[in-house]
């Protein structure tokens, strides 16, 4: 891997994604807490259940982002130490694996975004029908 520093240069962007995902997790957790503090109707229970599933998605995405970050760091360190130029050397394989984890995290975050809109629409429709 000739450019061993490549995976390490991606880390600031991953840090911003992790920060954003963590912030969303905290906000969602507070929303769930607020819903659980209120009188529990069937609709509140439905929304709480959907939001808990959303929290699970964010947790998985965050875990994959942390894992990708660690793998990128390891890839960069091994790339600097081993200085190999093969397409299938250990640092390159780690870089590819980290990129796959990052891609899966993006897919999960996209699913999260679409489901969030559906939950908001459900809440809006319920409030409008009252």
Image (spheres, rainbow, N blue to C red):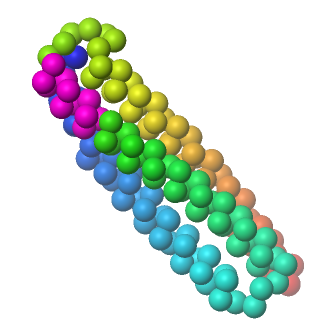
25 magenta-colored? no
Query: In terms of depth relative to the viewer, which is nearer, 82 or 106?
Result: 82
Q: Is 80 displayed left or right of 57 in the figure? A: left
Judge left or right: residue 4 versus residue 104.
left
Q: Is residue 40 left or right of residue 31?
A: right
Q: Quadrant of residue 83?
A: top left
The total of numbered circles placed on residues is 0
Name the residue at 31% across, 42% down: 70
- Quadrant location of the N terminus? top left
Question: In which quadrant of the rendered image does the C terminus lie?
Answer: bottom right
- Quarter of the image for residue 4 reads top left
Please name the predominant secondary structure of the magenta segment in the image. Answer: helix
Residue drawn where x is 50% and y is 72% of the image: 27
Q: Position of residue 108 (x, y in %)?
A: 57, 45
Q: Which residues are magenta?
A: 72-82
Vertical arrangement, residue 39 with respect to residue 99, above or below: below
Residue extending farthest top = 86
* Left or right of 7 on screen, residue 98: right
Q: Position of residue 122 (x, y in %)?
A: 77, 67
Rendered view: 62 above or below 107: below
Whether 105 is drawn above or below 21: the answer is: above
Provide residue 8's location: percent of width, then percent of height: 22, 36
Q: Nearer the viewer, residue 97 or 119?
A: 97
The answer to whether residue 113 of the structure is visible from this angle is no
Q: Is residue 127 visible?
A: yes
The structure residue drawn at horizontal position 58% and vertical position 62%, both measured from the top left corner, is: 55
Relative image position of residue 57 (x, y in whole percent): 59, 54
Q: Residue at x 77, y 76 (%)?
A: 45
């Amino acid at each position: 891997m000739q450019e061993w520093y490549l995976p390490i240069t991606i880390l600031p962007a991953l840090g911003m994604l992790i920060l954003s995902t963590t912030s969303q997790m905290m906000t969602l957790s507070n929303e769930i807490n607020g819903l659980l503090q209120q009188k529990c109707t069937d609709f509140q229970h439905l929304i709480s259940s959907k939001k808990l599933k959303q929290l699970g998605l964010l947790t998985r995405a965050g875990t994959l982002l942390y894992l990708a970050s660690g793998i990128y760091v390891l890839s960069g360190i091994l790339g600097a130490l081993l200085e190999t130029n093969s397409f299938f050397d250990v640092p390159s394989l780690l870089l590819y694996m980290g990129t796959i984890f990052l891609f899966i995290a993006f897919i999960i975050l996209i699913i999260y975004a679409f489901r969030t809109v559906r939950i908001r629409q459900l809440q809006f429709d319920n409030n409008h029908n009252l």
